[in-house]
Image (tube, grey):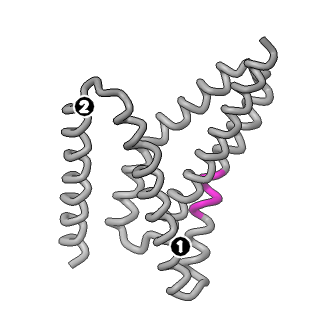
Amino acid sequence: DEEGSLNTGRSAVILLGALAVHSVLEMTALGLASTFGESALLSLSIALHQPAESIALLVAFLKSGMPKPLIIKYLSAFSAMGPCGVALGMAVQEFAAPVVDAVMLAVVAGTFVYVGATEVIPEEWEEQEHKWKKFGSLLAGIVSVFAVTQYTMTLEA
């Protein structure tokens, strides 16, 4: 069905746009990092979830029936977003006023919280199956972030 593949192709491109913005923002945060602890923590976080994002994007494009050369072009553009984000963050940290650095970090952090609170968490709670496991995982994630934050604060002190 041509219309169905057009819709899945459109969905894949929309996913590409969303993940590209996400990639630029998270890598901008890495470029803005001013200490080894911050850089290491962000690098670990990115390394743990980037493969899943890339695979999800690849699967979306393959399901769309899009020609492989076009998929390669889209994935190449997605791959370029990370280095662009790091370069942007490094340039802001190096050349811009400290307030610009602070505002960009606030935008990046706010974007992550917004997406998590409005997209990821509600989507996970739509199905009631495994609700206690999901709740336990959510709490474990919150506690983990808190613990890592407290630990990195001791490194910087």
Whether residue 97 sits left or right of residue 149 in the image: it is right
- Which residue corresponds to mark 2? 131
In the image, residue 3 lies in the stretch drawn in magenta: no
Which of the 4 image quadrants contains residue 4? top right
Q: Is residue 84 above or below residue 4?
A: below
Which quadrant holds the C terminus? bottom left
Image coordinates of residue 41 in percent, x first then y, are: 34, 58
Whether residue 127 sits left or right of residue 12 in the image: it is left
Q: Residue, x 37% and y 50% (percent of image)?
A: 44
Q: Amino acid at mark 2?
A: Lys
**Which of the two residues, 26 or 82, is positioned nearer the viewer here?**
26
**Which of the two residues, 146 or 44, is positioned nearer the viewer here?**
146
- Residue numbers of the magenta segment: 81-86
Q: Residue, x 37% and y 43% (percent of image)?
A: 121
- Sequence-earlier tag: 1 or 2: 1
Q: Amino acid at mark 1?
A: Met
Image coordinates of residue 153 in percent, x first then y, are: 23, 71
Q: Is residue 101 above or below residue 109?
A: below
Whole-number angstrom distance, CA of label 1 to CA of label 2 = 35 Å
- Which residue corresponds to mark 1? 104
